[in-house]
Image: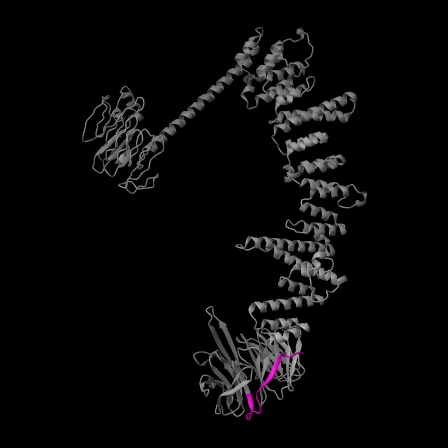
């Protein structure tokens, strides 16, 4: 025990019998048995006590109970079984109101709620509960009076103790306790024990303290226990008062002061005949205790005097609560609380409460190296020497060590997640940023390395997952030593891989793959090396070559998988380098690699296609040599045929090989059919067919060759049947390839094969040119044998002609449809008013002189400025750059003279005549005034437009260059000038239909006629 409070006498041997007390601020109210009310002022720690006011006639009967609400300056009293409210501001405490309904009351309790608004104002709501026999009356304070809160609550018995928290009333009856909700729900709790008299005390945090003999049970507003253990007193207390963190109990022989968390007897005060006790409202650490004739004030001993004793006795929880009540500045108080919490966490670790201890360390953001140092052999020696602890660190062994390490893993995981989520604040000094990042990396290195060691001690299956993290910060040397010490070679390889030490990882894999001591180990085979090399990527291609050789030498098929596996890293390897490596060092695998590149990866590089063909050729020649030695080996024979089939198939389907490059490397005494295929690819069909007919003597193969070539898209292959026919009819004219081994035949043996030639004509008459064929056919062939060929040829030509005629008709019909659509589009009406907006300059047409127009090559129509470069200016603000000026506010510049055209330009129609600009050597002419609003609509004939102005003058504008008839009329005229107001007529025909192809310009000034 230690001294938490100091008892100071306030009143001694009072001539009146004390019945009740209440206190607030610096005032003490004493109610007596005689009905007197005394008000004292207690100053300077109870050393200065004065009687401020007294009222001998306050009540006629004993004052049973007093309560104060200083915010409303009211005093509530219970006397003569009636509750009254008095004014504290007036000297004699006059009655404000009497609750006549409460006649017969035996006890009351208050529920005072103090709330602070956002503006700092404090609002106080007061509710009153009065016990009247077997009923509870509820009131609330408003406008200087208590009003009924609701209907009375009927009970089965009269309560002898009552407490109020939020919407719950805790009632103590004779022999039991119960909870009563304001809405009427009731719950029975437990009996009072041997003594039937109940004891109820409302605590902070919406809790109740209930007496049961010598024990005090704490419950919440739902009736659930708040603490694991009860608070036990020396004897049954008569009264309880809370002064956080202590609970004071009035016993028959003394005052006991105890702490609930932890359960602790703090102090015992011998105050004779003490019966009453009340805290001072709005002032912690000050409590008044009274007997019938004495009053004492209990003052809390200063916190800084209590803390050393609490820390010495290791009562850290109580010390933390007291430190929070200290009057020190906020920063000092916070630092003090954190220091005590750190000591408490260390104490918990000493008591082997590892989870609770490390959670508190995490909450305090303690340096991880401080926490890790609590464990043996986890913190490096250089760090361990720098850490100091308040006491000796316990030595952990066996199960305690396992539990501690598991708690440490949980702690380190939370610390790691917290460190990874931290970001350096923007605006921080660059030097501070650098130091913060360095410190963060050091902490992560310590945390991750310790996590690795913990996993090795408890659950080594998690080691690999930690090392595979992309952001793991394990210290390389320390982690390497730990893994080797625990023989975790597979995990060591992962560590090397994540740190980019691929050569060390591969050397370790090679060592264990070839070691007989590691038989049965996951590293005892070459598979891990293959997998490792497959994931290195193109940046490490040289390293792949270095370590792939020993795998290929011992396991060629698996070694080839390093370069052909279906993985992104493998496909991205430089294929030319891989082929070069295999060709120089492991030539037997080069062919398989190229087959995968060409057929599986669909690589179109000509280098690989040419190399594949050459490798096929070399393999065939090698097998052919072996067959000459041992021709009876069926395996060699089968492999030889298979290789030839592969080569022919490849040469036929490959579109990316270079036949010329391959032909140079082909032998001249064999592989004739393959050479023919290559010759066909370069268009040398006569040489290819010469090989089939003169060397191979295989006419069906030659015909098949012709079929394949004819079906190709190239037009140069359409003559292939004629070449075959020519070789059959004129064998002496066959083109020979220099150096090729042709068979030695006598001239008389090379006779024309007329029968096969005629057979070819009969089978493919539509594929052979009849004109060329008749020129080379011998004159001795009867015409009857050519009947079928000639008929089929004529039918083919006739069919082609009909197809062309049909196509011509379809194209002409399409031309008419397009022409009809053009006429339809040209007949659409276009109306331009001041409300219209130019699509170029986004301005309205009118007097604002908008600027806009069409692009080069076509004049703007309806735009604000005529298009530059068009044959004709637009209708708008300003005329076009070439041709005639536009209709608008200002005439356009006249066009420049062109060959065959006019040498002088012409001004536009508008309010102000534009300055004409002539061609080379020519001059311009001004325009004339026009209307402000212009309507433009097409005439029913192409090239004719009608423009109407606001002056009701109709202009018919005719573009002679868009009419064939007008072009014929004006074809011989060198200079054409049509000034504004000219009338143009055509009198060359009597038909009105013909005359409608031209139009006239009606104007008030001039008349000009062209005949």
Q: Nearer the viewer, residue 300 or 776?
A: 300
Q: Residue at x 79, y 45 (%)?
A: 518
Residue shown at 58%/69% (left/top)?
Answer: 333
- Above or below residue 198? Residue 636 is above
Can you give x and y, in whole percent of width and height, for residue 757 in the image?
60, 13
> Does the rendering let one see residue 136?
no
Tell me the quadrant of the picture where the C terminus can be found: top left
Residue drawn 49% across the image and 20% down it: 799
Q: Is residue 908 left or right of residue 109?
A: left
Q: Is residue 804 visible?
A: yes
Q: Is residue 48 left or right of residue 536?
A: left
Among the 4 quarters of the image, the one containing residue 235? bottom right
Q: In this picture, which residue range is highlighted in magenta?
A: 1-19
Which of the pair 754/683 is nearer the observer? 683
The percent coordinates of residue 480 (x first, y second) are 72, 49
Is 147 left or right of 106, judged from the image as shown? left
Q: Nearer the viewer, residue 19 or 671?
A: 19
């Amino acid at each position: 025990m230690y001294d938490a409070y100091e008892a100071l006498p306030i009143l001694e041997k009072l001539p009146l019998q004390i019945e009740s007390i209440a206190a607030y601020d610096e005032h003490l109210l004493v109610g007596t048995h005689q009905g007197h009310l005394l008000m004292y002022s207690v100053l300077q720690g109870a050393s200065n006590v004065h009687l401020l006011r007294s009222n001998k006639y306050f009540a006629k009967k004993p004052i049973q109970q007093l309560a104060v609400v200083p915010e409303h300056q009211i005093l509530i009293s219970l006397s003569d079984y009636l509750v009254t409210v008095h004014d504290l501001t007036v000297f004699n405490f006059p009655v404000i109101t009497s609750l006549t309904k409460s006649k017969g009351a035996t006890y009351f309790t208050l529920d005072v709620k103090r709330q602070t608004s956002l503006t700092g104002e404090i609002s106080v709501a007061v509710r009153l509960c009065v016990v009247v026999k077997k009923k509870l009356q509820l009131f609330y304070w408003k406008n200087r009076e208590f009003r009924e809160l609701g209907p009375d609550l009927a009970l089965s018995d009269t309560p002898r103790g009552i407490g109020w928290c939020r919407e719950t009333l805790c009632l103590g009856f004779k022999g039991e306790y119960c909870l009563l909700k304001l809405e009427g729900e009731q719950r029975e709790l437990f009996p009072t024990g041997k003594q039937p008299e109940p004891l109820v005390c409302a605590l902070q945090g919406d809790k109740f303290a209930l007496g049961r003999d010598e024990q005090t049970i704490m419950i919440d507003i739902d009736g659930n226990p708040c603490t694991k253990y009860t608070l036990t007193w020396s004897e049954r207390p008569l009264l309880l008062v809370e002064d956080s963190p202590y609970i004071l109990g009035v016993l028959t022989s003394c005052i006991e002061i105890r702490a609930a968390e932890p359960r602790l007897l703090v102090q015992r005060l011998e105050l004779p005949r003490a019966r009453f006790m009340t805290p001072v409202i709005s002032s912690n650490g000050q409590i008044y205790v009274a007997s019938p004739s004495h009053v004492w004030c209990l003052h809390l001993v200063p916190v800084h005097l209590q803390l050393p004793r609490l820390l010495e006795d290791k009562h850290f929880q109580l010390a933390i609560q007291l430190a929070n009540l200290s009057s020190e500045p906020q920063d000092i108080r916070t630092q003090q609380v954190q220091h005590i919490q750190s000591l408490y966490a260390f104490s918990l670790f000493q008591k082997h409460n590892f989870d609770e201890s490390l959670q508190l360390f995490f909450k305090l953001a303690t340096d991880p190296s401080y926490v890790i140092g609590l464990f043996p052999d986890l913190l490096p020696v250089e760090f361990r020497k720098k850490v100091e602890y308040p006491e000796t660190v316990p030595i952990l062994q066996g199960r305690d060590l396992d539990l501690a390490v598991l708690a440490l893993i949980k702690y380190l995981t939370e610390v790691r997640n917290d460190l990874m989520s931290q970001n350096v604040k923007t605006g921080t000094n660059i030097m501070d940023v650098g130091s913060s990042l360095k410190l963060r990396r050091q902490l992560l290195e310590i945390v991750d390395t310790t996590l690795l060691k913990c996993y090795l001690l408890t659950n080594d299956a998690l080691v690999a997952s930690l090392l595979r993290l992309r952001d793991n910060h394990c210290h390389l040397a320390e982690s390497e030593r730990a893994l080797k010490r625990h023989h975790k070679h597979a995990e060591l390889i992962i560590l090397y891989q994540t740190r980019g030490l691929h050569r060390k990882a591969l050397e370790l894999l090679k060592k264990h793959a070839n070691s007989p001591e590691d038989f049965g180990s996951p590293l005892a085979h070459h598979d891990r090396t293959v997998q490792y090399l497959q994931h290195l990527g193109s940046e490490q291609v040289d390293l792949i070559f270095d370590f792939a050789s020993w795998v290929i030498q011992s396991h060629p098929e698996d070694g080839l998988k390093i370069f052909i596996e279906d993985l992104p890293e493998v496909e991205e390897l430089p294929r030319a380098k891989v082929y070069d490596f295999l060709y120089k060092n492991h030539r037997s695998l080069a062919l398989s690699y190229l087959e995968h590149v060409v057929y599986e990866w669909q690589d179109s590089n000509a280098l690989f296609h040419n190399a594949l063909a050459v490798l096929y050729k070399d393999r065939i020649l090698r097998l052919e040599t072996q067959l000459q030695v041992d021709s009876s080996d069926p395996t060699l024979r089968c492999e030889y045929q298979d290789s030839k089939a592969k080569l022919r198939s490849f040469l036929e389907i490959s579109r990316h090989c270079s036949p010329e490059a391959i032909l140079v490397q082909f032998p001249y005494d064999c592989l004739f059919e393959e050479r023919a295929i290559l010759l066909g690819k370069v268009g040398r069909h006569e040489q290819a067919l010469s090989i089939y007919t003169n060397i191979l003597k295989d006419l069906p193969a030659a015909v098949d060759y012709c079929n394949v070539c004819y079906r190709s898209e190239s037009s140069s292959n359409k003559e292939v049947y004629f070449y075959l026919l020519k070789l059959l009819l004129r064998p002496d004219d066959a083109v020979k390839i220099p150096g090729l081994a042709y068979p030695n035949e006598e001239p008389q043996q090379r006779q024309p094969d007329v029968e096969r030639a005629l057979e070819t004509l009969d089978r493919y008459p539509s594929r052979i040119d009849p004109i060329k064929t008749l020129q080379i056919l011998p004159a001795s062939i009867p015409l009857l044998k050519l009947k079928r060929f000639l008929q089929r040829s004529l039918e083919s030509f006739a069919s082609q002609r009909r197809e062309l005629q049909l196509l011509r008709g379809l194209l002409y019909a399409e031309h008419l449809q397009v022409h009809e659509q053009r006429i339809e589009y040209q007949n659409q009406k276009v109306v331009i008013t001041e409300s219209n907006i130019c699509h170029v300059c986004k301005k309205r047409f009118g007097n604002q002189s908008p600027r806009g127009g069409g692009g080069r090559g076509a004049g703007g129509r309806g735009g604000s400025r005529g298009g530059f470069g068009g044959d004709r200016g637009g209708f708008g603000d300003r005329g076009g750059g070439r041709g005639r000026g536009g209709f608008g506010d200002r005439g356009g510049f006249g066009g420049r003279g062109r060959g065959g055209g006019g040498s002088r330009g012409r001004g536009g129609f508008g309010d102000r005549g534009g300055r004409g600009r002539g061609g080379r050597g020519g001059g311009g002419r001004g325009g004339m005034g026009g209307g402000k609003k212009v309507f433009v609509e097409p005439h029913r004939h192409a090239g004719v437009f009608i423009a109407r102005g606001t002056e009701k003058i109709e202009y018919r504008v005719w573009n002679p260059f868009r009419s064939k008839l007008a072009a014929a009329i004006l074809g011989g005229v060198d200079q054409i000038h049509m000034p504004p107001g000219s009338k143009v007529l055509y009198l060359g025909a009597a038909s009105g239909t013909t005359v409608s192809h031209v139009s006239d310009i009606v104007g008030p000034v001039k008349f000009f006629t062209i005949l």
